[in-house]
Amino acid sequence: MECSVKWFDGMSFVAETGSGHLVSMDGAPDAGGRNLAPRPMEMVLVGAGGCTAFDVVMILKKARQEITGCDVKVTAERADTDPKVFTHIHMHFVVTGKQLKAEAVERAIKLSAEKYCSATIMLGKTAEVSHDWEIVEG
């Protein structure tokens, strides 16, 4: 896996992923940015949220659960001093489907957190990662 990151202007950067996709990042105005794109550390949380949502959907589909939606709200706290690593990350899952089994949803989230989600497991080396979830019929 690889990517390249190019400084664009001010504190704006454009990354090209190894799969050929472009992603913009920018800094806050007080750091010289223009607030045009997500901060790099926000992208880390986006990656973790996407990684775990991917796992949960795949696991539930394989378990023949009729899943129709999976939303993950990721909140985090960072250290006050440099390096300002994440110290606490919480993921709240809202899983939508028809007659989803609570134990299947719980199992999918646990498998992602403990076995499959590389991003979350990696972040767990510096942060306390917690999860909760709810099921919505639909």
Image (spheres, rainbow, N blue to C red):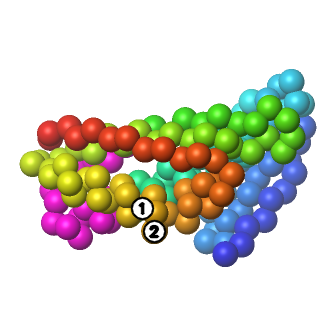
Magenta range: 56-72
Q: Where 11 falls versus 116 (above or below)?
A: above
Percent position of residue 2, x then y:
71, 72
Confirm or deny contact between disc 1 and disc 2 (CB under 8 A).
Answer: yes
Q: In the image, is residue 95 part of the stretch drawn in magenta?
A: no
Three-letter residue code for mark 1: Ser
Q: In the image, is residue 57 part of the stretch drawn in magenta?
A: yes
- The residue that label 1 is drawn on is 112
The quadrant of the rendering that contains the N terminus is bottom right
Percent position of residue 65, x then y:
16, 60
- Give the residue drawn at x 61%, y 40%: 88
| Front one among 71 and 16 | 71
Image-based side of 42 in relation to 56, left or right: right
| Front one among 109 and 28 | 109
Percent position of residue 41, x then y:
71, 44
Q: Residues within 10 Å of mark 2 (few under 14, many from 20)?
A: few
The residue at the far left in this view is 99
